[in-house]
Image (tube, grey):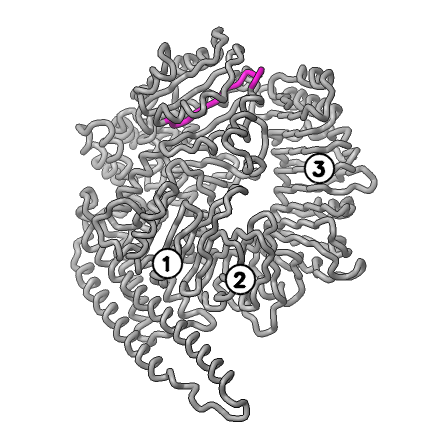
């Protein structure tokens, strides 16, 4: 809710002023204490308060009054911070001008001309803060008089830890009858040779996508089709992005590699790749026939039983896609509803008998809509398992039995929102800031939550850790879907179902949580604090609306660029960052001179100079993400910014040089991510300044130092005890023996080495193999002087992902150990021209799930086939294990390709292009 988020944000601001090494302003001690006491009281009040008008289209007046008071406090404090910093800059400019004009042998006695202004501003600040405190005192009286004794507080009960490897998309629990599954699969594998479109239609939340996913991942389907690829269309579709996704999946190319291709080029490549291959393409969530008309020409009719499966909630489209067949999704019957409900709440555990009657009533009240079942079940999973609590939920759901299906579903989903803990509500509402069907990167989402002030410290944990816990909580409640897992099982991207996003939008509009440019709003536009710019919004409309938003604190732009403006002096968040295609040369306005309160700056710029010129005045900057194609050197002020948590330079060159810190610089205890730094000098002073760094991505180049010194002090990297993710890249012109002295901290979980300069890596691999917690290791262009890599006993005890890329000198991969890589799940081999074998012991790893091979030799492919056979002998039912081999035509003779493709079979796929 907006009120609770505003209170947490205000508390974070007060904390920043109190604990900053040089706060721009200060408050009287009694004022600070009064504000803190009021905020804490109101936070506790909101945790037990139930809005009497929560089901109307109007926001609760008391909650909005609390939010307005918190906003007023922030306005007063942050406005005076802007004035204070601008005044100090103006005075400094005047003093410099005076000394430049005045004779050097005459002293200046007029440095304090602005003291009267300072005093007036300070008095004004105290008076305005007192006014806010008085309003909060009045609100406290109203809150104390509010009757909350009858409100049942639904507290979360402790939940067992669920390993990340077991996390699935919520749709994975959907229950489908055998005849539905078999009916779709029969159509996909029918005798009709021509290209067929198979539509699946039904209302939102009924399980169309889940059914398509279940069929798409079925072993028989995987074996039947040569190529399988999936694209989400959505209402605001982009044909080029759809083609890019399909080409990437079909050819196993990284989407970044395809960024220069035009829509025509991508369509042509996809058509050529699919030609003469049997393919299955899924077009998920199609809203109109135009999106199909713009893309259908790229799918060749090979007369080889290829299929296209389309999911849509628009029933009228099915006759245009296939006038002979479509599958209409039906609601679940009582039996399947109960199975899904039971699994959602208790998993494989026994359903308590005393709750079974109430549970069946609630499952029935979901009207067979799978999304409602998993959301209500997700709510109950987190509640106390008692009849008293469950009866309250049942009474809320049975009150809407007579509503039509659509409204009924929304009412049920809104009930789950209403019963969220207050600290989760703003995090959930924020999900609709992003575009429909966006795959939202978790790291970006958590950074925005932090900078928006939604999160508060708990038990000494970092805000990033708390943010991930909040996300996991929303996933467990089935309010957010896991879209992509990382290679070691972590949640990488998430999505929100359309109906749940509708709830976010509805509640956000009601509370004025954010404003979307171009959409009408009943609230005064100049009071909006969060502004969203959708990617299809006209530039003219953006300029018009932003002119009036003097109180805006956040601008989230899907444009990737923003117009220039002078009204945003209170801005705290600018997120206008988006990966640009190489042909797009537009940049965001990089002038941040007046935005002294910025916490989050993520933009694309042509040069860093304009940002760095005002860097020292960004007193509370926490996140700096810059896409810039020119090399930049950070100003010395960067070591005097203790609030910084995340620094990242992106782009092709992405080179940021750091100056040497001085002894009077601060310790940057909050800094956890540092990416895109070139020639990082990890001397003792630097180690002292970044004690809590968690992720480090650095690159070395040039000839600084000699061949026998340790100029960059790489040995000190081992002293970064909190470091878990390390990426080091050495380019061709790098000189020096620093890398031989590189030592790693024992907490390291992920390591990428990209060594373009012929560095001999055998000795380094022994060090890496001894790291006890390492889960992910990538080696790019590693040079093997002996041509041999031998794995020893007890090495890599925790490794889950191993990737070897373009290590051309690696010929033999051996081991004398009886078992290796005990926890390995994924092996990725890319462009290993010299490698002749894979250790047979890999075939006996019980956790192994997949081997991906691109451009490897014939002998290695045959080794992989033997590993598949060994895995099947260990567990003949292990359908989750698979090997995928991709062979480039230009590197292989046609006879060899035919021989290797004949190896294709269960769990083993060979493709070439």
SS label for mark 3: loop
SS label for mark 1: loop
Residue at the outermost front position: 101
Nearer the observer, 332 or 494: 494
**CB-based contact (under 8 Å), mark 3 and mark 1:** no
- Report x, y in % for residue 903: 67, 17
Q: Which residue is mark 3?
A: 806
Front: mark 2 or 3: 2
Q: Residue at x 44, y 38 (%)?
A: 439
Mark positioned earlier in the residue sequence (3 or 1):
1
Q: Residue at x 60, y 56 (%)?
A: 631
Say if residue 357 shows up in the picture. Answer: no
Q: Which residue is mark 2?
A: 609
Q: Is residue 702 magenta?
A: no
Q: Which residue is mark 1?
A: 565
Residue at the outermost top position: 191
Mark positioned earlier in the residue sequence (2 or 3):
2
Q: Range of the magenta residues?
A: 275-286
- Report x, y in % for residue 711: 73, 62
Q: CA distance from mark 2 to mark 3?
A: 37 Å
* Disc 2 crowd, CA 10 A, few/some/many (<14, 14-19, 20+): some
Q: Residue at x 63, y 25 (%)?
A: 883
Picture layout, residue 670 above or below residue 201 = below
């Amino acid at each position: 809710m907006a009120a609770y988020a505003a209170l947490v944000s205000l508390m974070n601001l007060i904390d920043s002023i109190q604990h900053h090494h040089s706060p721009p302003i200060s408050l009287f001690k009694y004022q600070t204490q009064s504000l803190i006491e009021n905020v804490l009281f109101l936070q506790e009040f909101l945790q037990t308060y139930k809005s009497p008008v929560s089901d109307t289209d109007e926001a609760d007046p008391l909650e909005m009054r609390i939010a307005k008071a918190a906003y007023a406090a922030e306005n007063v404090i942050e406005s005076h911070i802007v004035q204070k910093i601008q005044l100090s800059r103006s005075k400094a400019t005047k003093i410099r001008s005076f000394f430049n004009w005045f004779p050097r042998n005459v002293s200046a006695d007029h440095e304090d001309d602005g003291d009267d202004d300072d005093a007036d501003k300070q008095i004004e600040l105290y008076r305005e803060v007192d006014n806010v405190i008085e309003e909060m005192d009045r609100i406290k009286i109203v809150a104390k008089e509010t009757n909350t004794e009858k409100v049942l507080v639904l507290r979360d009960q402790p939940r067992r830890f669920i390993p990340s490897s077991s996390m699935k998309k919520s749709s994975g629990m959907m229950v489908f009858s055998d005849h539905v599954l078999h009916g779709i699969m029969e159509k996909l594998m029918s005798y009709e040779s021509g290209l067929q479109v198979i539509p699946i239609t039904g209302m939102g939340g009924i399980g169309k996508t889940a059914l398509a996913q279940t069929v798409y991942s079925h072993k028989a389907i995987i074996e039947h089709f040569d190529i399988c690829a999936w694209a989400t269309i959505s209402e605001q579709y982009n044909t080029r992005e759809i083609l890019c996704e399909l080409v990437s999946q079909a050819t196993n190319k990284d989407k970044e590699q395809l960024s220069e291709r035009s829509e025509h080029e991508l369509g042509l490549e996809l058509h050529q790749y699919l030609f003469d291959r049997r393919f299955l393409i899924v077009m998920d969530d199609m809203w109109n026939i135009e999106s199909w008309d713009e893309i259908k020409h790229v799918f060749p009719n090979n007369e080889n039983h290829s299929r296209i499966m389309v999911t849509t909630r628009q029933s009228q489209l099915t006759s245009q896609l296939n006038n002979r067949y479509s599958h209409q999704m039906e609601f679940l019957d009582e039996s399947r509803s109960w199975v899904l409900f039971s699994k959602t709440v208790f998993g494989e555990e026994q359903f308590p008998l005393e709750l079974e009657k109430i549970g069946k009533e609630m499952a029935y009240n979901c009207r067979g809509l799978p999304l409602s079942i998993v959301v209500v079940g997700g709510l109950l999973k987190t509640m106390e398992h008692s009849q008293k609590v469950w009866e309250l939920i049942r009474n809320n759901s049975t009150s809407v039995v007579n509503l039509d299906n659509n409204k009924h579903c929304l009412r049920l989903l809104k009930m789950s929102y209403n019963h969220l803990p207050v600290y989760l509500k703003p995090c959930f509402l924020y999900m609709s800031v992003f575009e429909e069907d966006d795959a939202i990167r978790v790291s970006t989402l958590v950074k925005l939550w932090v900078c928006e002030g939604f999160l508060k410290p708990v038990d000494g944990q970092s805000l990033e850790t708390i943010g991930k816990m909040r996300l996991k909580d929303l996933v467990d409640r089935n309010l957010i879907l896991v879209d992509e897992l990382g290679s070691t099982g972590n949640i990488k991207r998430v999505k929100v179902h359309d109906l749940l996003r509708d709830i976010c939008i509805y509640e956000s509009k009601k509370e004025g949580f954010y404003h979307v440019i171009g959409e009408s709003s009943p609230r005064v536009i100049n009071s909006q604090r969060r502004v969203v710019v959708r990617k299809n919004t006209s530039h003219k409309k953006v300029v018009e609306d932003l002119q009036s938003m003097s109180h805006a604190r956040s601008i989230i732009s899907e444009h990737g660029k923003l117009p220039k403006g002078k009204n945003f002096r209170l801005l705290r968040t600018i997120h206008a960052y988006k990966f640009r295609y190489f042909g797009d040369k537009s940049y965001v306005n990089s002038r941040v001179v007046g935005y002294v309160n910025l916490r989050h700056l993520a933009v694309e710029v042509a040069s860093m100079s304009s940002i760095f010129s005002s860097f020292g005045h960004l007193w509370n900057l926490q996140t700096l993400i810059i896409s810039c194609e020119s090399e930049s050197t950070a100003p010395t002020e960067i070591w005097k910014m203790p609030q910084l948590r995340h620094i990242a330079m992106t782009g092709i060159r992405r080179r940021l040089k750091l100056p040497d810190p001085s002894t009077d610089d601060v310790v940057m205890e909050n800094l956890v991510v540092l990416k895109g730094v070139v020639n990082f000098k990890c001397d003792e002073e630097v180690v002292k300044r970044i004690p809590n760094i968690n992720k480090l991505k650095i690159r070395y180049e040039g000839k600084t130092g000699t061949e026998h010194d340790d100029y960059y002090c790489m040995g000190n990297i081992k002293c970064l005890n909190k470091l878990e993710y390390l990426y080091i890249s050495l380019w061709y012109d790098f000189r020096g023996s620093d890398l031989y002295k590189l030592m790693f901290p024992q907490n390291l979980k992920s390591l990428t080495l990209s060594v373009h300069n012929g560095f001999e890596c055998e000795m380094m691999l022994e060090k890496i193999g001894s790291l006890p917690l390492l889960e992910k290791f990538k080696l790019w262009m590693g040079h093997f002087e002996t041509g041999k890599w031998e794995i020893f006993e007890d090495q890599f005890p925790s490794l889950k992902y191993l990737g070897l890329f373009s290590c051309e000198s690696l010929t033999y991969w051996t081991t004398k150990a009886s078992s290796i890589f005990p926890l390995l799940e994924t092996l990725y081999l890319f462009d290993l021209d010299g490698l002749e074998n894979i250790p047979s012991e890999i075939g006996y790893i019980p956790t192994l799930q997949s081997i991906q091979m691109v451009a490897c030799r014939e002998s290695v492919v045959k080794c992989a086939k033997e590993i598949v056979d060994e895995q099947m002998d260990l567990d003949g039912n292990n359908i989750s294990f698979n090997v995928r081999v991709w062979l480039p035509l230009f590197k292989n003779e046609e006879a060899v390709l035919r021989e290797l493709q004949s190896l294709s079979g269960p769990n083993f796929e060979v493709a070439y292009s």
